[in-house]
Amino acid sequence: MRGNNVLGLIFANADDGVLSEITGIRSMASVPFGGGYRLIDFVLSNMVNAGMTKVGVLTDNNYQSLMDHIGSGKPWDLSRKTEGLFLLPPFNQEAVNNYNAGWIGALHNITNFLERSREEYVFLTSTTYVANLDLTALFAYHEAKGADVTLLTRKGPAPALRDVLRVAADESGDITRLSVDDLPDSDACSSLSAVLIAKSLLLRLVRAAYHKGGVSFEKDILIKNADRLHYAAFPVEGFCPVLDSMRSYFAANFELLQPENYRSLFRADRPVMTKVYEDMPAVYGIGSDVRNSLIADGCQIDGEVENCILFRNCRVERDAVVKNSILLPGVFIGSGAMVNYCIMDKAVSLRAGKTLSGADTYPVFIGKNIQI
């Protein structure tokens, strides 16, 4: 199976509610991560690195930030005369309602787009996980197994997402049981909400489920057809956090401070691409102290920064102390201020001498443009 024979579909607003503080002004797909990326960057890069040349991004609301970020798809070589990147927003209120109802309604809205696409297979995915995946291995695995549907799975407890599938598979990788409830097996896995399926089969299943009032792709398609379709599980190893809460988002960012996780996510042979801003390098003033942190271009550090993720154009003034925190683009920390266990959205300003502190289990979130 060639990559250019697979159509990519990304559900940009899937599970927005689990990061409601951050997604109040943006989609899940455009949530910043890792000091200079958005969640959609990892999914798009996985697709392009596997040779996929056509990707549709299904959106519901709050997609202005996403549009600004992905643009025409040029950073991922998806700005093309044919194929390329397609933004697929709802075109009327009924379409909005269908998207909110679940994947089935959203897919039904884009039936014409699917039918006009020449690709024989479809890779559907959310952006609730962060991983550098070799999708060419997935394509080969799907073909070798002769599967109707292949699910990307990960060992561990079920994340707190909507309709997460718990999967039990035999030694050969064939799925033997599916459930949206936890399975008693200690070796059960969770689906990453990423599926490879033939386009013709997908269209047939979506039409049938939609006209019967189906909403959930997992319950009303995958589980209901488990007895007559061949399902395979493709296990994902290595660094692959699932973002199902603010706490997990906070923890996943800080896991990148471990060199083995950073190297697993950012590989030379499968680069992660993103929109590039022409910023100056970070500037470290005399007397600044920076330890175990990711600092993006455009930052100016004159104070102390430890165990932090700083996005572009952040400013930490002299005698300020920032620890165990995530600062999104344009955050200003005044002289003598102290910050610990916080997530600060874009353009937050903390005045001189102020103190903000949360805990590792409950980081404090400060919304965009707020001045304290």
Image (cartoon, rainbow, N blue to C red):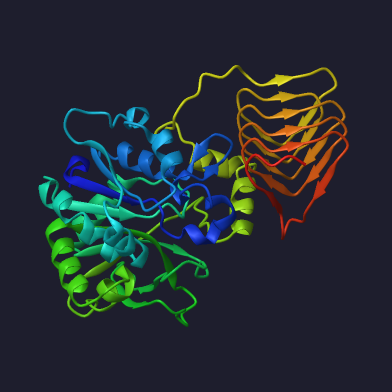
Q: Quadrant of residue 355?
A: top right
**Residue at 66%, 21% in the rendered image:** 282
Residue 129: image x %, image y %?
46, 53
Residue 344 placement, left or right of 208? right
**Camera-side residue of 59 and 73:** 59
Q: Quadrant of residue 234?
A: bottom left
**Camera-side residue of 59 and 258:** 59
Q: Where 110 sits versus 146, above or below?
A: above
The number of numbered discs placed on residues in the rendered structure image is 0
Residue 251: image x %, image y %?
63, 53
- Whether residue 255 appears in this view of the structure is yes
- Whether residue 272 appears in this view of the structure is no
The extreme front residue here reads 93
**Residue at 25%, 79% in the rendered image:** 224
Residue 143 placement, left or right of 30? left
Residue 142 placement, left or right of 368? left
For the C terminus, the quadrant is top right
Q: Where 132 sits versus 347, above or below?
A: below
Residue 54: image x %, image y %?
23, 40
Q: Where 165 sits versus 340, above or below?
A: below
Residue 317: image x %, image y %?
80, 27
Q: Quadrant of residue 289?
A: top right
